[in-house]
Amino acid sequence: MGPMLLRNLLFVTAALVLVLLGRRPARRAFGASPAFSLWLLPVLAMLLPCLPELPAHWVALPAFRVLPDATASGAIDPQVVASSSWPHWLWLAGTVAMMLRLIAHQLRLRRQCHPLPAATAELLQSELDSIDPRRLRLHPAGPALLWAPRSLLLLPADLLERFDADERRIVLRHELAHLRRGDALWNLVAELVFALLWFHPLAWLARSRFRLDQELACDERVLRDAPNDEAGYARTLLHSVGLSPMPALTSWLTQSQLKERLTMIQRHRPGALRRRAGFVTLAALLAGCVFMAQAATDSRGNQNAEADLTYNANITPHYPESAIKNKEQGTVVLVILVDKNGSPRKITIDPVSDASSALGRAAMEAAERWHFSPQMEDGKPVDGYARVPVTFNLESLPEKTAQRS
């Protein structure tokens, strides 16, 4: 696994830990709706390489290692590259399998949908506000929402028999709250993120917690609009039959969520001022975490350093014969001004170098043919500097050559 991917995985792990530890304190302090916004943090962590980078003008690349036979550079070892590629293929195979599973499940859910009878739609119209009747479907998994990509409201065929008028009103209000919040789409995004992180233990734990926090936020919104319905809401939860969570589906109730949802109903909910303060505080927290993560990484040029190194490793400095004869070794630290096209414009040797002038010239001659990923500022390439150590050593000097010396 490359350094950039490993670093990004570390940020995603830290984001998941922060959300899993902070979700309950945030819910008690600000309410379920602001606390649910914490789940944006893992998504932002995954998108970190795509976000605009902080201003930076330096790139530090790993050292080249130049040997006397000029056949090897310590920057790239083909055997190591080949042996280290299998985790990428394993991850890709797992991700493809999870994506195919999600697509198959989505298609199966769509096939099981049936149009809502006109008589039922007319009977429910007063309770469904102004929702388009074409978004109503009969489905055995209902009541639930399905992203389609225009979210569909799935209702069970026995809706009128399973729930009385009051319970039916509460169930439909709950689903409409999900619809207005865009939870069907966010559920799909969560499943896509989970498919990418299928190998991560915390992702399996976070998946169920995400669904619970989503339901709690929806419950809070419904009860905020109708605080007098608390007792009826709790009775409806108790009378409902739980369904197992299914990918891409926002369902009404799962048995494991029941206790915590009933507890939330009984607890005093924060007022509007605390909720707004919560959104502002958590938004600042998310922005601060992203800023710190960007500050902890190298610049975008450093993220592309591995690709630069792979390309430049094919242009290895030549070990001068005179240096081999005189048994000269050392490290030449090149300071390279890279123009916006990625080409070296000016090459100098840092005074910290501990190599002879012959080795310095050899390193500079090779560096003139190198190429670098240019620095970016406001989305545009700009001039920047690259610092590249080039180490010359004689450890693989052929024995007969050493004897002649």
Image (spheres, helix red, strand yellow):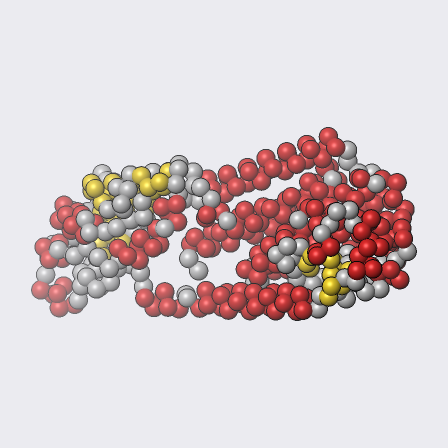
Decide which of 45, 340 is in the foreground and name it: 340
Query: Residue 3 is drawn in which quadrant?
Result: bottom left
Q: Relative to 163, is 221 on the left or the right?
A: left
Decide which of 269, 80 is in the foreground and name it: 269
Query: Which residue corresponds to the image point at 85% horizontal and 40% vertical from the top-left?
Result: 227
Q: Residue furthest top?
A: 273
Query: Residue 145 is drawn in which quadrant?
Result: bottom right
Query: Which residue corresponds to the image point at 21% horizontal and 42% vertical from the top-left?
Result: 345
Give the quarter of the figure containing the C terminus: bottom left
Can residue 206 be seen in the rendering of this structure? no
The image position of residue 252, as x and y in percent, is 77, 56
The image position of residue 152, as x and y in percent, is 69, 57
Query: Residue 94 is drawn in which quadrant?
Result: bottom right
Give the quarter of the figure containing the N terminus: bottom left
Q: Relative to 254, is 291 on the left or the right?
A: left
Q: Relative to 233, is 247 on the left or the right?
A: left
94 relative to 319, above or below: below
Query: Which residue corresponds to the image point at 68% horizontal and 35% vertical from the top-left?
Result: 278
Can residue 313 be seen in the rendering of this structure? yes
Q: Number of labelled discs?
A: 0
Query: Which residue corresponds to the image point at 24% horizontal and 59% vertical from the top-left?
Result: 314
The image position of residue 262, as x and y in percent, is 84, 50
227 relative to 167, above or below: above
The image position of residue 332, as x and y in percent, is 22, 47
